[in-house]
Image (spheres, rainbow, N blue to C red):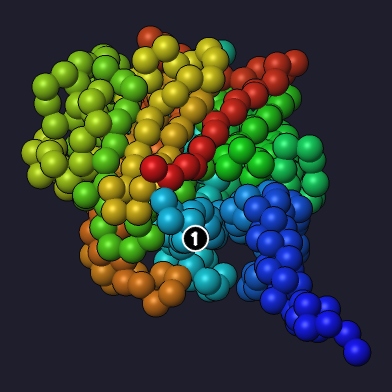
Amino acid sequence: MSSPATQTPRRPALRLLAASALLALSTLPMPASITKSLFGRMPDGTPVDQYALTNADGLVCKVITYGAVITELHVPDRSGRMGDVVLGFDNLRQYLTESPCFGAVVGRVANRIANGRFTVDGNTYTLAVNNGPNTLHGGIKGFDKIVWQAEAVDGPNGPSVVFSHVSPDGDEGFPGTLRVRMTYTLTNGNEVRFDYEATTDKATPVNLTNHSYFNLAGKGDVLGQVLQIKASRYTPGDDWLIPSGILAEVAGGPLDFTQAKAIGRDIRKVPGNTHGYDHNYVIDGGGTKLVLAARASDPATGRTLEVSTDQPGVQLYTANGMNGSVTGKYGQAYPAHAGFCLETQHYPDSVNKPSFPSTLLRPGEEFRSTTIYRFSAK
């Protein structure tokens, strides 16, 4: 007969070993992945696909081919809980009928062109107008309203989707056949990286950006979220937000975000008829290389967003027109200031302002630009 010592059950030790193994596995990086599914169909039957990108830390970014829209972006808070930090819809119908550019790429020219008109090399071009007398975000059917070609790429830095589109000569009134390629990457450094490229066969303005609305808490308004913008100047404009051409100092006024402050602290003091922030900031040291343009954080969740770009400006917009009448994902009715946008770009109406950095792209040249949104939690 075996001794009592040899009869001692060993199952607790095995369970402890198994638990230790599972804990070790849970701390290992996840394999990055890309999955593709059908999101919906356009009225003419054209399919709109959705790509779900997951990085090694488990962050998830979902994008669709309509408008190259970011529909979901799940990032962790300080406790590791994942939350969706962008506004949007869970169906194509609402993107077609209700969306204020949620998550979309905008172009050919982001922001405003005064009176829908500009002159290049002695030729005057008249554009489609969709913002009073002006052209906004590319016109009536800008890049946010087309179905892009897309290709999934599993690269060394994380999963990507490469979007491409050929905008024909005369599209919305713009000259030249513009060939655009955009790569969205969810990096294993917890970044959403945008790499834009474009070429043309006629001189034409180009100004591309992404129009995601962020809410780092995932719900409610963003007035208590904290923002810093690395910009000591901005481009003041008229009632239509067309810049005068001068660069004004922000120091001491409600537009001053050079030191971090709550978005809502001075929002009621913003001059004009915008009912909040809708202003282009001149990034300190911007326009030639990647620099930190802005940092936002949510005190409740600890989520932090850092925006780096090689563009000269960033447009801060605080969803001023929302009033609860639009219901987005998860059945949430979006109130006023439900999100904030940090649209990295050239200044508004640059094509008509010789003193501003040029947006003009000529044949034989290549437009290239990079913007990075980096997420962390503190």
Residue 76 % position (x, y): 48, 54
As drawn, is 226 to the left or to the right of 375?
left
Q: Is residue 123 visible?
A: no
Residue 8 seen in render:
yes
Q: Residue at x 19, y 30 (%)?
A: 255
Side (left or right) of 189 relative to 218: right
Classify residue 91 as left or right of residue 251.
right
Which residue is found at the position 78% from the left and 78% from the top? 5
Q: Looking at the figure, which quarter contains the C terminus?
A: top left
Q: Amino acid at mark 1?
A: Met
Q: Give me the residue at 26% from left, 17% from top.
A: 232
* Nearer to the camera, 200 or 215: 215
Q: Quadrant of the N terminus?
A: bottom right
Which residue of the protein is positioned furthest toward the right in this rendering? 1
Query: In the rendered view, would you say 345 is above or below 270?
Result: above
Residue 265 lies left or right of residue 288; in this view the side is left
Residue pushed farthest bottom?
A: 1
Residue 32, position as x, y percentages in the image: 74, 51
Vertical order, 10 against 160 (above or below): below
Query: Where in the figure is residue 317, as x and y percent of width and height?
Result: 32, 43
Which residue was labeled with disc 1? 82
